[in-house]
Image (tube, grey):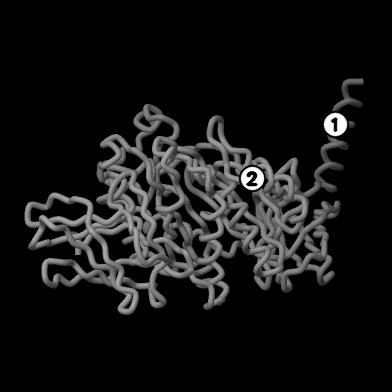
Amino acid sequence: MKHLSILLTLILFATSTLFATVTLPEIMSDNMVLQQNAKVKIWGKSKANANITVTPSWSNEKTQTKSDKNGNWTAVLETPAGSFTKHTLTISDGEPVILNNVLIGEVWLASGQSNMEMPLNGFRNNPVMDANETIALSGKNKGIRFVTIPKNAAMTPQETVAGSWKESTPENAAWFSATAYHFAKMLYDALDVPVGVIVSSWGGTRVEGWTSREILETYSDVDLSEKAIEALNPMARPLVMYNAMIKPLINYTIKGFIWYQGESNVGRHDVYAQRLANMVKLWRNDWGLGELPFYYVEIAPFVYGDGETGTSAAYLREAQFKAQSIIPNSGMISTNDLVEKQEKRNIHPKNKTEVGRRLAYMALSQTYGMKNIASRGPEYKSMEIKDGKIHLSFHHADDGFNRMISAEGFEIAGSDNVFVPADVEIDLNNRIIIVSHKEISNPVAARYCFRNFQIGNMANTRELPMVPFRTDNF
């Protein structure tokens, strides 16, 4: 009996090896969206040196590949133009695995901290604007698909991570990132193709958490010893989100990135722009798809530790704005006008609809070539002092501004560098803004919403807000 048992075990092992089924990462699942008009990677594991055949229903052409000695394999498929036709994908090493309900369209990765993570359902005591309506109608958008990567941390780069694709339904959409959902919805409506979003975010994380060891080793203030990392709050740990939540995704072919983070780096504005640029360069190199677009969100007004009128967040926003100049193919959208007064101590403002839409406007304009879609609000260009007043000029205000009177958020200072609320004249003909103060005869600088919590009301004629700025840093 003992010998018979051993023989049966050997036979079963040989049989299972002979007909081993390929295994796929969770992100290769039913309901997934593949990037249109691209060479996309399909990957997984099998037994060593196995012949793998991948057959997509859109062409029925068989693509052959072979696993390596560790059983890893990758196949590259050419995808057609996006459509709402449901496809299947058959992967076989002798025994087939079939993926169903696969769509071809546009795929983006959404990352950052809690304002990107925040689902349509909201957080406790933190609502999302119009969430009930958005969730109720989400089933009309069956071409929108999401995969949400669970929070995970690792000291070394990981091959796989959990998370599978979900269709847009009221049951599922409540747990989709609100910002990413409204981004996807605008692209879906404007491009008329399916849109897939991979959400990999973690509230409270710093930019260093999404960066590799090789880069972090060049930062003198970052201790990468396991003991030092484990001593930190999980959200504040460097390296570990990149290893566990970005590295496993780099084979998935995407169109670009959207990013909402920065709150946890307030106080480190001096290094933020370069560290964000380093992260973006790392991700682009990992994906190997060229300078993928990177669009990101300015942190919203909030009362940080130095108070409502403090400037710690203002300096971080300034660093975010400057990052555009060192990150090719990037853009920042402003959120200065998307916070209500009662939200001054709520770091999760409820209006995620416009945040997502503004990111989508930037993508539609800069990535998809819809040049008549405005994507940027007025940005400070230059100043001129005339007759005791400061004349301010702006980019992205060619058709003027959204108001003729009652501008809010401007301040002016004399040689003492004490900023006080300014009187504002709006010169619509010349598209400039003139600021002054009756007690400041020789002004030297002006600012706009350069405080932790200060809501402005200036925008261009496409209703995109003026980006907070200071003239005393130029």
What's the residue at 81%, 46% (across, down)?
20
Residue type at mark 2 is: Phe
Residue denoted by label 2: 176
- Against 386, residue 342 (above or below) is above
Q: Position of residue 234 (x, y in %)?
A: 44, 32
Label 1 CA crowd tier, 10 Å (few <14, some 14–19, many 20+): few
Q: Position of residue 33 (x, y in %)?
A: 71, 59
Q: Position of residue 291 (x, y in %)?
A: 47, 68
Q: Circle 1 — which element? A: helix
From mark 2 to mark 1, how far is it between C-alphas? 46 Å
Q: Is residue 286 left or right of residue 173?
A: left
Which is nearer the eye, 8 or 299?
A: 299
What's the residue at 88%, 25% (across, down)?
5
* Nearer mark to the viewer, of 2 and 1: 2
What's the residue at 52%, 59% (across, down)?
257
Q: Is residue 20 left or right of residue 330?
A: right
Residue denoted by label 1: 9
Label 2 CA crowd tier, 10 Å (few <14, some 14–19, many 20+): many
